[in-house]
Amino acid sequence: MNKTKVIVGLSGGVDSSVTAMLLKQQGYDVTGLFMKNWEDDDDDEYCSSKQDLIDAVSVADKLDIEIEAVNFSKEYKDRVFANFLSEYEAGRTPNPDILCNAEIKFKAFLDHAMEMGGDLIATGHYAQVRENPLQTGNYQLLKADDGSKDQSYFLHRLNQAQLSKTLFPLGQLLKREVREMARDAGLANAEKKDSTGICFIGERPFQEFLQRYLPKNPGVMKTPAGKVVGQHDGLMYYTLGQRQGLKIGGSRDSNGEPWFVAAKDMATNELTVVQGHDHPLLLNDGLKAGQLHWISGKEPKTNWVYAAKTRYRQPDAPCEIDAMNAEEVDIRFGQKQWAITPGQSAVIYESNVCLGGGIITGAV
């Protein structure tokens, strides 16, 4: 019998439930931990935390494991949400799920799990971790085998201490296999819909949510030629490449192509919009990124072809490192990339190994 104690982040979803089930089957001493990270809208139609806790407790009962609930709302507000708001206010588009993983799910949770007497933690993320075959005691983050579900992009800021204590049991499984396992085991949440969007926003209208914290600051929408085609509510509510919610569909020119956000001028409070998905202002050869983090301590080198993502759902794009120092990296792509967005993360891969990345500061 394996007496290693693993604390599993049980969210109430099917992925974390199957994670706990697999670890128990493998002989680990498993305890579930339900994390409550947001409580401003607990009675809100978009907030599902109450149902999620019910589902998590139901799964723990079915698996015959203990479960504890912990409230990390204060830590989340201080470490993640404050950064989220300040980034939007500055005109950038942050990815709070990346910061949440680094600061909450693999820091606050890990610390709490160790206090509970845990040896390791586990989550339902689709990713893999292994000891570096070329360096004992050094850990690498790998893509999941299911490319359509791979979440290594969101995990690229994890450090060696975090990876050395983490298990990702779903890394070699396909999502459909996970659901089949849940069905076969009779788990009540086997068919539960995957959560989408930012955890504290859920399915709610994004601009409506943001307006609670960042008041409107209207200005004009202009074409690159300077023609005013509409009004915006505040630059922080828009992101590069955005098509929905511009409310200028009726002012299309004769080519009939939809409008996209191409640039934000914080100094003049003007939003530049263009027509056509492949407008030249939406396409760039490269980017600069800062706040760099290299998971295994191995910096990518120049004159070497890697792959990178500048947003989660994007296919890997071949790239090279033009220049790099401790603060900043210049990445050049083989093909122009669409709507490179400051505040988002650029994540670099060598084959299926995630090397790390940084926060995009601008396109070049």
Image (cartoon, rainbow, N blue to C red):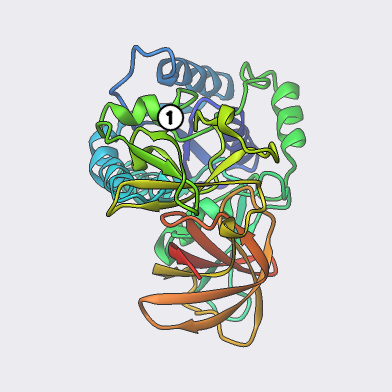
At label 1, counting other C-alpha atoms closer than 10 Å, the crowd grade (few under 14, some 14-19, many 20 or more) is some
Q: Residue at x 55, y 32 (%)?
A: 244
Near-viewer residue (195 or 169): 195
Near-viewer residue (286 or 257): 257
- The picture quadrant where one finds residue 53 is top left
Q: Position of residue 199 (x, y in %)?
A: 44, 33
Q: How many marks?
A: 1
Q: Is residue 356 above or below residue 311?
A: below
Q: Is residue 137 above or below residue 259?
A: below
Q: Position of residue 30 (x, y in %)?
A: 50, 37
Near-viewer residue (268 or 115): 268
Q: Position of residue 273 (x, y in %)?
A: 51, 46
Q: Residue at x 61, y 19 (%)?
A: 189
Q: Is residue 266 visible?
A: yes
Q: Residue at x 54, y 77 (%)?
A: 136
Quadrant for the N terminus, please.
top right
Q: Position of residue 304 (x, y in %)?
A: 65, 84
Q: Is residue 102 visible?
A: no
Q: Amino acid at mark 1?
A: Phe
- The picture quadrant where one finds residue 26 is top right
Q: Is residue 57 above or below residue 134?
A: above
- The picture quadrant where one finds residue 279 is bottom right
Callout 1: SS: helix
Q: Which residue is mark 1?
A: 206
Q: Residue at x 40, y 45 (%)?
A: 96
Q: Is residue 118 above or below residue 184?
A: below
* Residue 62 horizontal side relative to residue 351, left or right: left
* Residue 327 horizontal side relative to residue 324, left or right: left
